Image: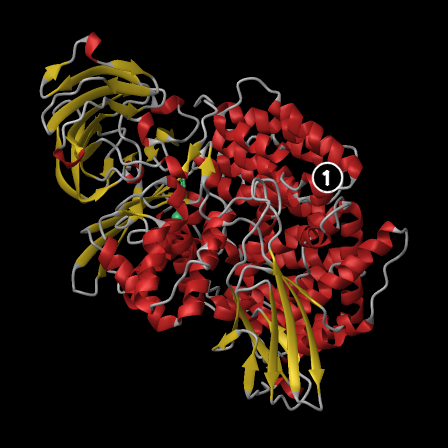
Amino acid sequence: MRTDTGHVFKLEDYRPSDYLIPKTSLDFRLSPDATRVTALLTVERRGGVATSAPLVLDGDGLTLLGVAIDGHALAPADYLATPDQLTIPKPPAAPRFELRLETEIAPSSNEALMGLYRSSNVYCTQCEAEGFRRITYFLDRPDILSVYTVRIEAPHNEAPLLLSNGNPVESGVFADGRHFAVWHDPFPKPSYLFALVAGALGKVAGSFTTLSGREVELGIFVEPGKERLAGYAMDALKRSMKWDEEAFGREYDLDVFNIVAVSDFNMGAMENKGLNIFNDKYVLADEETATDADFANIEAIIAHEYFHNWTGNRITCRDWFQLCLKEGLTVYRDHEFSADQRSRAVKRIAEVRTLRAHQFPEDQGPLAHPVRPRRYREINNFYTATVYEKGSEVVRMIRTILGPEVFRAGMDLYFERHDGEAATIEDFLKVFEDVSGRDLAQFALWYHQAGTPNLTVSSSYNAAAKAFTLEIEQSVPPTPSESRKRLMHIPLAFGLVGAGGKPIAWTTVEGATVEDGVIHIRKRRHTVRFSGVSERPSVSLNRGFSAPITLSVQQKADDQLFLASHDSDSFARWQAFNTLLTDVLIAAFRQVLGGKQPAFTVKLAELAGRIAGDEALEPAYRALALSLPSEADIAREIGKGIDPDAIFGAREALALAIAAANRESFEALYLGLADNGPFTPDAASAGRRALRNILLDYLSLLPEGAALAATHFHSATNMTDRAAALTVLAHRHAGSRQAQEALAGFEARYRGDALVLDKWFLIQAGVPGPQTVDKVRALMQHPAFSIANPNRVRSLIGTFSSANQTGFHGADGQGYRFFAETVLEVEKRNPQVAARLATALRSWRSLEPVRQDKARQALLQIANAENLSADLRDIVERTLA
Ligand code: PHE
Ligand code: ZN
């Protein structure tokens, strides 16, 4: 485990290294407990300039067996080696020399899953961000670009397949049963993109002909016997390659592109050059084992990693502060891909729900940081929703401000100007300034300033003057270490909506720049006056979620109701209905807290019924509209004094009111959507399943609900329907005979399929109520559970702590105590996964006082544990600060 040095890395301390490593040759003799790594590094003085600087290479837990320069072994006095660093105080004066390093590592005991490790008998690597230094000593920083040649040698029976980055150049077998392969990657790359895979894997082959007619050989490697589960991923890969050519003019650049699925992986997937490594959860799918959400994730993540080939690999990051340069941009690209492949309107709503669920609480709590942070103690902790999702929104805003053509011209210039470089956010913004002639200095605050901006808006209409006025005021709440905020440039897309949903025209506008349906907010206050407005409009704001902000709008419920039925912008229309639901839920929460039974107006339930049955709307859209704000969404909107039990009570009451008011129409719709015909994973079919399953969710609250859900479960012909029914049974009818039977049946049916059992763990970890903590403890003893496997830990412990509001935040504090113990247990093996788990308590200060105190005790228990990793200490200390 990496020791916590307490060192804080600062953006302003960046300086180029004294040495470069233009060429790297690696030789691996693989063995589970003692792998020999020989590295031959061509080391150059930067600019050929003589320097007296020592050569200092990064390591992490390494054992050095030998070191030589230009073929001569160094005497012990000529270098200083610790597990974490190799220093050569006086390297040769020549402008270039060859450094040979020999290290020994033990992949089989590597449970942190960084560097070279074993996953189900397969050797694999994970080097981002700083895992390469667990393989050999190196200048392990992203601005050191090197051309790699990799030779791998292993016993053929143990590892028939030997893969690395780039193109295969040579292979051979020895008489003793060993064999080898050599790979060469002609594109200079940072060490974090290095990868190696060796083992016995099944292959799914494909090919792709690029824009310029080059043939690329594609391979997806999976556990033998699971090849047929990789078909969807292969199809998604080909569609991604095509899309990047069409949408961004980006062509693939090597002769082969390989993807390997492994079952122990800290994150979703990794974009290593020409050799992407995936969490198998994001590769393997068929209708029997994967839900529609799984299919959509696979498509998005395959695309994401593939798109990194240009945004991340060909152009990489100068340092880790620039992480959003590759991540925010690549998320933006994968979002656009999915929008083009599926339904743009539905995709946008789902993106915003994700942003609000994950990024808003981060931005509004103790872990808030800018999209481009200026400080970090542990970079692993900055693979966040802010860097990824808000980073994507910032790119989207650039496109909104410049328009699609100028945006594309800027991207073209970015690729042309920075190909082969390690770039910065300043470089990225500069290309858009250059192609547009605009000054983006104020806009750049989106990268530099943390916190979610808020716009307060009120409106008035003067019929006599035909004038409509918007009063808009911006504020950015303080965040840790940034108490004073500067004014931002917020592109606010809007529409004035008249009777029947028709846009209302105006003649002139003053008080702000308004272009193409976007008000450019740049000052603290704007009084935006539209003249020539012939009727009183309802105003639709932040259409398409043009900016990642919160809105406080003084708007009548009637206007919201009107927009929820008539707004021509599908996002804003969904938003209007969602806002109505949220407002009603907050009111109901207060009633429950006051000991009252919440009451709801019929209007809202009627509107829900109309949306459900509106054939003009896509089923997927209707399903999204009908899915109530989550308990966490409601808590975020309330902001403080959170009592999760009262939120739960309010939400269940509203769901029941909607179900009761629409019983007949929901039943008819539900029956009409019955699954028929062969399964296809496309968006339209998935949308029909989503609508049917949300209707089941409502109907399950009415009498005979458990029987209906049980029938749904037993007649399901795909995992989407089966998992939806199981969730309804387990969550709404916990303890019922039907729930017990379904859970047992599911377990028996999928015993031996770890990824499917993850759904079984997840569903049970989410059962509302304080008794679930004991169930989760018990499930940790289940033979399919393993505390060393990140997917198992996330399904059971992660779901319980981050998605079960009434279970985790039980008033007795049992959930928190279990959590503290378990995080510390996970940390012994895998600090990165433990640190991510620990973020579940980031919003502890918004809880009501009793829970708040208990949550704080749990955080202190973690903070006071001995020998904390850098990863966990960083999260816990910032959370408590
Ligand atoms: N770079 C990966 C991605 O976004 C994420 C990742 C980070 C994976 C660190 C592993 C380790 O695509
Ligand atoms: Zn990425």
Q: Which image quarter: residue 740?
A: top right
Secondary element at tag 1: loop
Q: Which residue is mark 1?
A: 809
Q: Which residue is nearer to you in this view: 166 or 263?
A: 166
Task: Indicate the quadrant containing the C terminus: top left, top right, bottom left or bottom right.
Answer: top right
Type of colouring:
secondary structure
Task: Indicate the quadrant containing the N terminus: top left, top right, bottom left or bottom right.
Answer: top left
Residue 675 vertical position relative to residue 183 in the rendered view, above or below: below
Residue 42 appears left or right of 723 = left
Q: Which residue is nearer to you in this view: 470 or 639?
A: 470
In the picture as drawn, the residue positioned furthest to the right comes out as: 595
Where is residue 227? Give x, y as percent: 35, 48
Mark 1: is the Cβ under 8 angstroms from ligand 1? no
Residue 530 appears left or right of 40 = right
Q: Is residue 492 visible?
A: yes
Q: What residue appears at the point 49 percent right and 35 percent down from the top-left corner? A: 790
Residue 685 appears left or right of 850 = left
Where is residue 188? Give x, y as percent: 20, 43
Q: How many marks?
A: 1
Residue 166 vertical position relative to residue 822 in the rendered view, above or below: below
Q: What residue appears at the point 53 percent right and 48 percent down from the top-left corner? A: 450
Mark 1 packing: few (<14 Cα in 10 Å), some, or many (20+)? Answer: many
Q: Is residue 105 visible?
A: no
Q: Which residue is nearer to you in this view: 730 or 793?
A: 793
Q: What residue appears at the point 19 percent right and 30 percent down from the top-left corner? A: 26
Where is residue 666? Give x, y as percent: 71, 71
Name which residue type carries label 1: His
Q: What residue appears at the point 56 percent right and 44 percent down from the top-left corner? A: 482
